Image: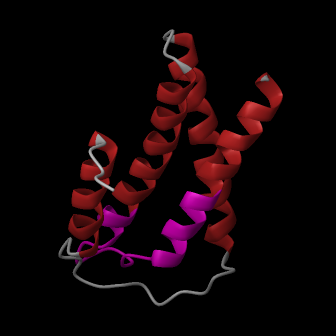
Amino acid sequence: MVISSPRFYILSLFIPVLICSGCTHVANDSWTGKDKSEHFVGSAILAAAGTAYGEHQGWNDARSRSFGLFFSIGLGAGKELYDSREAGSGWSWKDFAWDVAGAAVGYGAYQAIHN
């Protein structure tokens, strides 16, 4: 099976770059800290807002969904990259996992309400 999707190629480049991003340090935090709910809720809101933006632009459902998810997850990754600088709190894979989970829930909630 040959995969020729542009999304596959983008993800196959994005993931190694993200893993090898040159973070100066990694955070040592818990899975249930106060900031985890903030990451979850913030990402959910951003994913829903991004999906709504796509729909209001007249994009098809697939493009709107992709934009909403990538918008939310991209901002979460950017925030973690900012935290990974030397003066920051460190890259947190746990925060990023909560960002991804929140983005998925926000997208799902938006679709449930608007369908």
Q: Which image quadrant: the C terminus?
A: top right
Q: Is residue 17 left or right of residue 80?
A: left
Residue at 58 percent of width and 50 percent of height: 43
Q: Is residue 107 left or right of residue 85?
A: right
Q: Is residue 102 above or below residue 54?
A: below
* Range shown magenta: 80-101
**How are the colours assigned in the image?**
secondary structure
Residue at 49 percent of width and 11 percent of height: 57
Q: Is residue 21 above or below residue 50?
A: below
Extreme residue in the bottom direction: 28
Q: Quadrant of residue 46?
A: top right
Extreme residue in the front direction: 1
Q: Which image quadrant: the N terminus?
A: bottom left
Number of labelled discs? 0
| Picture coordinates of residue 7, whole percent (x, y) | 33, 44
- Is residue 94 part of the magenta span, yes or no? yes
Q: Is residue 42 visible?
A: no
Q: Is residue 16 above or below residue 108?
A: below
Residue at 53 percent of width and 31 percent of height: 50
| Picture coordinates of residue 8, whole percent (x, y) | 32, 51
Q: Quadrant of residue 100?
A: bottom right
- Is residue 39 part of the magenta span, yes or no? no
In the depicted view, which residue is nearer to us: 11 or 83? 11
